[in-house]
Image (tube, grey):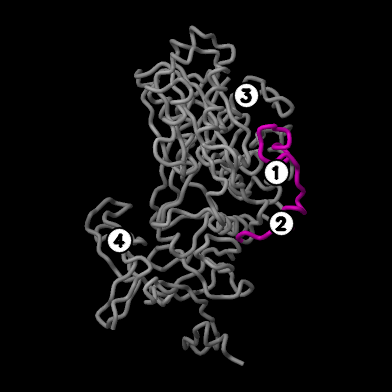
Amino acid sequence: MATVWIIGVGMTKFGKHPDRTATDLGIEAVLEAIADAGLDPGRIEAAYCGHVFQGMVTGQRILAQTGLAGIPLTNVEDACSSGAVAIREAALSIRAGEHDVVLALGVEHLTGRFRGALAPDESDVEAAVGLTMPALYAMRARRHMAEFGTTREQLARVSVKNKRNASLNPMAQFQKPVTVEEVLASRPIADPLNLLDCSPVSDGAAAVLLCSDRVVAQVGRTRAVQLAAAALATGAVEAPPGSMAREELTARTARRAYEQAGVGPEDVDFAEVHDCFSIAEILRVEGLGLWAPGDYPAALERGEADLGGRRPINPSGGLLGKGHPLGATGVAQVVELVRQLRGEAGVRQLADVTVGLAHCRGGKAAGVEGAACTVLIAVA
Amino acid sequence: MTTPVFLRPELFEVDAAGRAVLVGSRCEACGASFFPRRAVCARCRSARVATVPLGTRGTLYTYTTVHQSTPEFPTPYVLAYVDLPEGVRLLAQLVARPGEVRIGMPVELRVEPVREADDGRSVLGYRAYPVEEVTHGDGVDHRRRHDEVRQAP
């Protein structure tokens, strides 16, 4: 199978940008990715744009202002996995031999768009009885606590770690660490989850430039990172339903990604995982096989997932610390993988990393475990 | 009687006695049950799928008290996933005080008005209620409905 390379990355600062638009943020990220690659933008042959709530032809508005108008572009929606799915589509088009240089971007502008909690689409039968995303994860947290003895303080430690990492990332929405006590004292959202257990409303954009073997041979491999796997799966209908403390969907997606990359969970040096809520990081890393089911909360207490630990999780700050502009999230995860693998991550640089994994999981539909899940693996 | 307005029409049917009941699907090929109902069995892909009434008694699988929601849902309220004996897990609002809710407790599903539609008619939805287990050791089912227990002096 043809190898796909990442040769340029860019992202805006994540946070509240009330005076900017999704287009504006997208332009900034795309221009940075092109400059980072040092490639003539005229060589970009196609683009994929992930977003959730930005409306029709969002990607085209960005291309029109970045000198890229005219090339084929596909807008992609898969809830919180949208950006990662855009990367996967871009990679597939290169693997298929259709294109040599492809742009994948993700954008979202959410400030002022929502009141209250994010919920599934209003057509969903679970939304009709009052399901919100925090409520879903709160109920999953309660199952993890019941099945594995996970404590409220252990949940809080995820937020504490990720906000500490974010304080070392100038692109992150949150720049100040928090304590376990502050998480426990924050406003209740859906018990046992409080405000500081939840990812924030964010605006932002991120972009990556992918290319084929042929092009990487011309531009040089010094700063190129290999995209060794890009797996996507959708939630299955479980009859009878399985444990909500487990992530069968994540495990199934990860198996495919590990197979594509020819690595196993033991080879993963660090990961960016979809920590939309504190409990979510626990569910993700256990689903990915990075820790055994029920083992991660104690590993967190031992510092194993810290920047200096044996397998850092969410060094960028994750969704909890860096922010969660839905469509941009999956792309920004890959920006972090590339910066860490190149040794360009500044004060949060990890030592001796060669294999990084990015995991996204988006959406909810009644009767299925989850809507969309992606696992991408990058190798230095 | 006016035509009822259902929360979601696909979740209900009116039985021979004129009562609205929650319905799901049962695969006639492999026996798997589903909620909401579906056109094809998700386990064996058979299209021989029948619409069947759901059981009204189940076990509380997990729950949360929601303190922040979308604008149309006043808070707080309790949400719970309920496991029904036929192998279906369904989400419902639970009418109970947070302190008295626990995983594994028996609950009963009731089809009832949950709000008013724009035209003033009531919208039929469903909610779950705790069922009190009363043990007398005499082999008789003494389970009472939660609201009867609550109203006791």
Residue A172 lies, in percent from the top left, at 66, 36
Q: Which mark is residue B31?
A: 4
In-front residue for pair A345/A45: A45
Q: Are marks 2 and 1 on the same chain?
A: yes
Mark 4 belongs to which amino acid?
Answer: Gly
Q: CA distance from mark 4 to mark 2?
A: 47 Å
In the rendered structure, the residue with mark 2 lies on which chain? A
Q: Which residues are the magenta region?
A: A162-190
| Up/down of A121 relative to A60, above or below | below
Q: Which residue is mark 1?
A: A300
User: Which secondary structure lies at badge 4?
Assistant: loop
Q: CA distance from mark 3 to mark 1?
A: 24 Å
Marked residue nearer the N-terminal end (3 or 1): 1
In the rendered structure, the residue with mark 3 lies on which chain? A
Q: Nearer the viewer, mark 1 or mark 4?
A: 1
Q: CA distance from mark 2 to mark 3?
A: 33 Å
Q: CA distance from mark 2 to mark 1?
A: 21 Å
Mark 3 belongs to which amino acid?
Answer: Arg
Q: Which residue is mark 3?
A: A339
Assess disc 2: are there few (<14), some (14-19) or many (≥20) residues with their C-alpha within 10 Å of its C-alpha. few
Residue lying at the far top in this picture: please name it.
Answer: A218
